[in-house]
């Protein structure tokens, strides 16, 4: 359960941060709230799936790759929605950072979601 | 008159020391090693159909001191039931009256030879932790080893680590009083030859250095102050000075520090005879100089680990770790990338350690920032 909670929290934080970077693009600054919300939501859902996966799979590499794949998939789903003003799609701008966020959530869940090993000395 | 060749004499000597195991459960298979006061043989236990190591005296022992020492060694081993300490199986007497005991036959390699197969530092440190666990267990049972060194550590074929050769081990005084069978003091055997495992300061019987012998609680002759037991290069300065009564767990901690230094550097302490060691011990506050510890560790050894080694090898017992468990705990913290007690970190060192521990995560974040920045610059979002 710890892994799921960790992955969801990380997803929320990193997803929100990823959304906030849209502030540097003046053209979409007025949609910042919506961008942050969708970015956080997709990362929370992705984090939940990554956490569940990490419960059953112990290999760090596998969890990290899964995180990347899930992040990429959900970023695609968001990027598939056109800009309401211009009708454009921003696949690269959303999918590349989104996949990196998924990768980071996967890696962090695998590394920091493990139970700490007891010190062997008695 | 024909003189016997050296080879013939050697064969006669070997034949003379072969123990007669008639009347015991054991069948002799071969010789394993020669120790300070006896020879260790490989034997087959006929009842249990297993191989054992059989240790028997091979020195003159008119006063019975060596026999008592051998029995003491067996009793100490029997008291220490731990996976890291070689277990004793049996004690008996040969047909010629000599006492023997049998223990587990350990197949494997001595640590000083096995270490060549361990290039990775973490692997060596994990072995060291296991040694500390065994020694800590012994300390908790009131037993000091007093001769810890790589040659007395065996690493088995499945990675098991065993501390061997408890021949100069000592029971702490309060443990002796509570033990009905153990004698109160340790004994320096008479006419013991100078060798790497058993070293005495005197040129003759115990007490020949000028200090009188004293009686223990059971009327046994105890080691007089000034007699030295241990191995140059691994024994603590107070042990080298013959301060038998002052020895406690920290003397073994010093030896563990020397073993750690050996594992980290791959080098043994410089060869030192007891005489040069005692000369250094009398001369100055750093008798450790006689141990070769003035040679610096290799440059790539992390500072925290150097500090651990230095603390374990501190010349005054008060400056060392209090026990083997504390030393092992610091090594464990080092392996986990946590701050160690021996090394107070500055802010920069703390940041550096945290970076090393979370290197991948840091680089992922940096990669994300760079990619995000490039997207913003070139793709406009």
Image (cartoon, coloured by chain):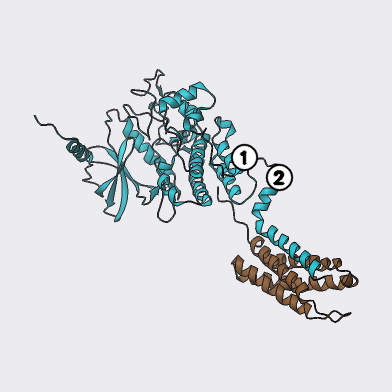
Q: Colour of chain B?
A: cyan
In this picture, is B186 found above or below A24? Answer: above
Quadrant in which the N terminus of chain B is drawn = top left
User: Which residue lies at the image location 86% right of the left edge and 66% below the top edge?
Assistant: A23
| B348 in relation to B190, above or below | below
Closer-to-camera residue (A72/B137): A72
- Mark 1 neighbour class, 10 Å CA radius: few under 14, some 14 to 19, many 20 or more: many
Q: Secondary structure at mark 2?
A: helix
Q: Do badges 2 and 1 share one subunit?
A: yes
Please give the name of the residue rendered at 66% of the width and 56% of the height, measured from the top-left corner.
Answer: B359
B150 in relation to A67, above or below: above
Front residue of B30 and A87: A87
Q: Is residue A98 left or right of residue B143?
A: right
* Residue B153 in the image, given as x and y percentages of width and height: 42, 45
Image colour for chain A is brown
The residue at the point 41 percent across, 25 percent down is: B275
Can you identify the residue that label 2 sits on?
A: B348
- Subunit ID for the residue under disc 1: B
Residue B381 seen: no
Please say whether residue B103 is visible from this viewpoint. yes
Q: Return the mark for residue B192.
A: none
Nearest to N terminus: mark 2 or mark 1:
1
Answer yes or no: do the residues labelled 2 and 1 have beta carbons within 8 Å? Answer: no
Residue underneath mark 1: B342
């Amino acid at each position: 359960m710890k892994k799921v909670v960790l992955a969801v929290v990380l997803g929320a934080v990193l997803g929100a941060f990823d959304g906030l970077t849209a502030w540097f693009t003046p053209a979409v600054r007025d949609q910042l709230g919506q961008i942050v919300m969708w970015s956080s939501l997709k990362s929370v859902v992705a984090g939940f799936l990554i956490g569940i996966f990490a419960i059953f799979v112990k290999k760090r590499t596998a969890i990290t790759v899964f995180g990347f794949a899930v992040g990429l998939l959900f970023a695609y789903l968001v990027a598939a929605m056109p800009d309401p003003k211009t009708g454009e799609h921003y696949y690269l701008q959303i999918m590349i950072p989104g996949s990196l966020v998924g990768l980071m959530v996967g890696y962090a869940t695998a590394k920091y979601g493990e139970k700490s090993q007891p010190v062997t000395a008695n | 008159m024909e003189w016997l060749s050296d080879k013939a004499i050697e064969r006669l000597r070997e034949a003379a020391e072969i123990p007669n195991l008639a009347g015991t459960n054991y069948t002799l298979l071969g010789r394993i090693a020669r120790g300070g006061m006896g020879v260790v043989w490989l034997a087959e236990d006929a009842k249990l159909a297993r191989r054992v190591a059989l240790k028997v005296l091979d020195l003159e022992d008119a006063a019975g001191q060596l026999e008592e020492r051998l029995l003491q060694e067996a009793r100490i081993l029997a008291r220490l039931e731990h996976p890291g300490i070689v277990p004793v199986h049996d004690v008996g007497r040969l047909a010629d009256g000599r006492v023997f005991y049998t223990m587990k036959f350990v197949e494997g390699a001595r640590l000083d030879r096995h270490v060549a197969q361990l290039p990775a530092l973490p692997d060596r440190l994990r072995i060291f932790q296991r040694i500390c666990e065994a020694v800590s267990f012994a300390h908790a049972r009131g037993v000091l080893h007093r001769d810890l060194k790589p040659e007395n550590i065996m690493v088995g074929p499945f990675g098991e680590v065993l501390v061997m050769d408890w021949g100069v081990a000592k029971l702490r005084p309060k443990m002796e009083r509570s033990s009905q069978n153990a004698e109160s003091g340790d004994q320096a055997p008479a006419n013991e030859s100078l060798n790497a495992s058993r070293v005495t300061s005197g040129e003759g019987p115990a007490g020949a250095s000028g200090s009188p012998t004293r009686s223990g609680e059971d009327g046994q002759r105890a080691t007089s102050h000034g007699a030295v037991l241990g191995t140059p290069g691994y024994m603590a300065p107070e042990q080298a000075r013959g301060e038998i009564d002052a020895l406690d767990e920290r003397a073994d901690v010093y030896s563990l520090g020397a073993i750690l230094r050996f594992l980290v550097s791959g080098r043994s302490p410089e060869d030192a005879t007891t005489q040069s060691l005692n000369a250094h011990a009398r001369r100055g506050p750093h008798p450790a100089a006689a141990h070769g510890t003035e040679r610096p560790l290799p440059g790539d050894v992390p500072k925290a680990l150097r500090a651990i080694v230095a603390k374990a090898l501190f010349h005054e017992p008060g400056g060392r770790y209090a026990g083997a468990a504390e030393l092992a705990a610091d090594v464990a913290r080092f392996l986990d990338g946590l701050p160690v007690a021996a090394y107070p970190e500055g802010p920069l060192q703390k940041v550096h350690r945290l970076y090393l521990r979370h290197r991948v995560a840091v680089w992922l974040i940096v990669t994300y920032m760079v990619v995000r920045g490039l997207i913003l610059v070139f793709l406009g979002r």
